[in-house]
Image (cartoon, helix red, strand yellow):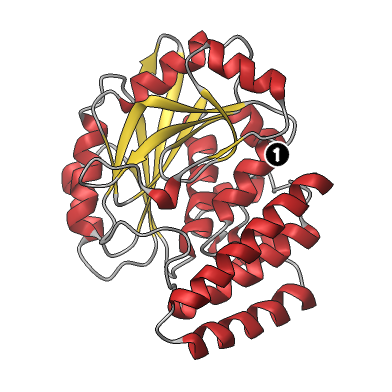
Amino acid sequence: MPENQGERVVAVVVAYNRAELLVEVLDALHAQTAPCGIVVIDNASDDDTIEIVRRTAPEAHLVHLPRNTGGAGGFAVGAAVALAREDPDLVWFMDDDTVPTPTALAELLEARRRHRVPLALLASRVVWTDGADHPMNLPRPRPLDGRRRREAQDAGLVAVRSASFVSQLVDTRALRHHGLPIADYFIWNDDFEFSTRLLRRASGVSVPGSVVVHKTKALASTDADPGERFYFEVRNKIWLFTRGRTLGPVETLLYGASTLRRWIRTFARSSDRAVLRRGMLRGVRDGVSRGPRSNADSLADLMPIVPELAVAPEGR
């Protein structure tokens, strides 16, 4: 694996039926001024994703999964593969529609070096195709810790409490200690749970100089109408607030109130509230009746394909 002044970095990209965009992502990784290894997790795509990876990034560790495990499962598998096959110092998570600018990784590494205390996580500035900040991927600033905010400001950075998987650089010591993303989340709030778990008692920052382009179809916010997928938003938030150990009591109240306001806005703007109501009822039922399974259980059928999962650290 390439090294950056002694720091070994591997990018984990989760892909699902976006082969054309994946080419841009892989080309952008090759164009980084700071080198990195690459792991690509193909979530049972039925387009030419596999051929694209083999042609565009033949050096990458490519894992083709027989079923779609969602972003959460894909990142859990990708992290397990990265840890076992590459033994990196840092893992760089991103989606298959995240195109990093050439200095995105170098800026993250430079920010890590100039921050006074060790960082568990660093997040890039995420913009849309027009250069505007993408509202879907704005990291949450750290509201209740003046010391960490000052340390970040002294380095020209912003202390954060959570961050999106759209360009998130994680110290593998934190990853090994706190465990992988929880695959059962499937989509939505998996990055919120994972990043708040890492940053409960550790420092993380947003790096304005590290820029990636999130090529979503529209410049949508988190309160845009999600249709049937609202089920995952509701179920996963209930899991996080009632069964997770990532937030303190005051934070749970703050983020819980923020979630309720966002749900109200989502319903108000929806063109089909009946779909949202069904998703909410199912989400409440499943969120209350059981918690997320361990990765060992939810990914058990993939163990023969990805034996690295057997030794991967579980989420704590």
Element type where label 1 sits in the image:
helix
Q: Quadrant of residue 48?
A: bottom left
Of 299 and 142, which appears nearest the observer?
142
Extreme residue toward the bottom, this view: 274
Q: Residue at x 50, y 17 (%)?
A: 112
> Is residue 293 in view from this perspective?
no
Where does residue 197 sit, x and y in percent of width and height? Answer: 69, 42
Q: Residue at x 20, y 45 (%)?
A: 130
Q: Residue at x 59, y 59 (%)?
A: 183
Q: Which residue is mark 1?
A: 178
Of 272 and 113, which appears nearest the observer?
272
Where does residue 280 sit, x and y in percent of width and height? Answer: 61, 80
Where does residue 54 sit, x and y in percent of width and height? Answer: 22, 48
Q: Classify residue 231 as left or right of residue 143.
A: left
Of 187 and 138, which appears nearest the observer?
138
Extreme residue toward the right, this view: 249
Q: Classify residue 19 as left or right of residue 245.
A: left
